[in-house]
Amino acid sequence: MSGTERVLSGIQPTAGSFQLGNYLGAVRHWVSLQDTHDAFYMIVDLHSITVEQDPVELRANTLLAYAQLLAAGIDSDRATLFIQSQVPEHAQLGWVMQCITGFGEASRMTQFKDKSSRGGTDHASVGLFTYPILQAADILLYQADGVPVGEDQRQHLELTRDLAQRFNTRYGKTFTVPKPLIVKDTAKILDLQDPTSKMSKSLPTGAVFLLDEPRVITKKLKSAVTDSETEVRFDPVNKPGVSNLLTILATFTDRDVEQVAADYDGRGYGALKGDTAEAVVEFAGPFAERVRELESDPAELHRLMSAGSAKARVIAAQTLALTYDQLGLVAAEF
Ligand code: AQP
């Protein structure tokens, strides 16, 4: 069902599988949002190339990401599900947005600082630096009213809002200024080996991948870093590792996290880890099976992708034409 408010979100094809955080913090909510909103979801392959990708893997991962979104419950009839690079207006509006962004303003984005520090700022690409500006273009192209954001994306959405307002003030009303969509129970899932940082596809040692074999998932959860105490308590500040496991278990079993914590009173970390692994495997097993089924028909996946991108492009082209016109760029008459 299409509602009146439009939402937009995206995921990078940076690995062969989504990790637990991508699902619990984002994709799971996208599935519910398609019931109440006019939903646009995309595989942001242009964002993924801000760090070097192997072309063969990127192609395979893009197809797999699409299959995973379908397997998770995104309905390509209800939501517009598409590939960013198949809609050239993203890169075109991205350039316009770069031209109205201050260098200092872009320099304040903390995610660039985090991600570039992994390999040293000198080795980071300019694309990684301007990533949030392309993200602004992604959102503004579709005149999205709301963007479901986790804490890590809040600063980028603020930049998007500033850029939309700046453009509208300078050149006349062109863009909808998007609002953050606060989704209830948006969990931030932490790295299992370093529970002070978030779980990430690109940090595989501490990540649980949904398409991993059940025994790998179980092993990773059972060896999650906790602390030297024995008491199971939900306390994200002092017990991030234990609280992370509680969050994962509570979300998969649809229960309140405090209630789950109470169940493990006096039972120790081993029981918590075992049950969390079981709950994740119970979801991941059938999920992986659905993905394999979808993957076995690549022609159908390509057909769905192209249809989604064509649908998205109709709106993107309208917004870009309006933007160019407002800027004073002369339209061709061919
Ligand atoms: N650990 C997490 N907890 C909650 N939400 C998360 N997301 C990612 N990690 C967590 C959310 O997943 C959506 C898609 O993410 P993305 O692929 O576009 O980029 P990302 O945030 O950079 O995800 P990764 O897994 O960490 O990828 P890499 O390693 O490639 O950078 C987003 O909505 C994000 O908030």
Image (cartoon, helix red, strand yellow):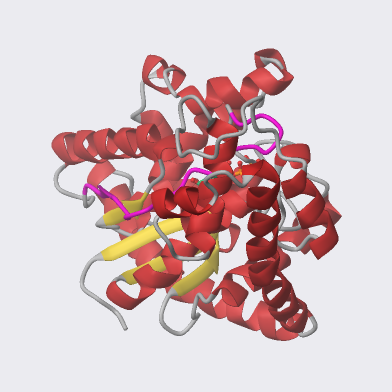
Residues in magenta, as a range = 177-195
Magenta residue check for 186? yes
Look at 28% across and 74% down and name the residue there: 36
Q: Nearer the viewer, residue 289 or 222?
A: 222
Question: Hey, which quadrant is residue 16 in on the image?
Answer: bottom right
Is residue 213 visible in the rendered image? The answer is no
Closer-to-camera residue (72/334): 72
* 164 shown above or below 277: above
Q: Is the magenta stretch mostly helix, strand or loop?
A: loop
Name the side, left or right, on which 98 lies relative to 130. left
Going by the image, does 291 lie left or right of 23?
Answer: right
Residue sitting at the far front = 266
Q: Residue at x 59, y 81 (%)?
A: 304
- Indicate the position of residue 241 as horizontal and vertical percent values: 60, 35
Ligand 1 location (quadrant): top right
**Residue 46 percent location from the top left of the image:** 61, 48
Q: 331 or 126, which is in the foreground? A: 126
Query: Eyeballing the image, is 237 above or below 75?
Result: above
Count numbered badges in the picture: 0
Does 220 lie within the magenta span?
Answer: no
**Whether residue 259 can be seen here:** yes
Q: Which of 106 and 256 is in front in this view?
A: 256
- Quadrant of the image containing the N terminus: bottom left
- Quarter of the image for the C terminus: give it: bottom left
As drawn, is 80 to the left or to the right of 268? Answer: left
Q: Where is residue 181 in the image (x, y as percent from the top left)?
A: 29, 52
Residue at x-position 35% and y-position 68%: 33
- Side (left or right) of 47 relative to 319: right
Q: Where is 162 relative to 39, above or below? A: above
Q: Position of residue 153 (x, y in %)?
A: 42, 39
Residue at 44% x, 24% y is 109
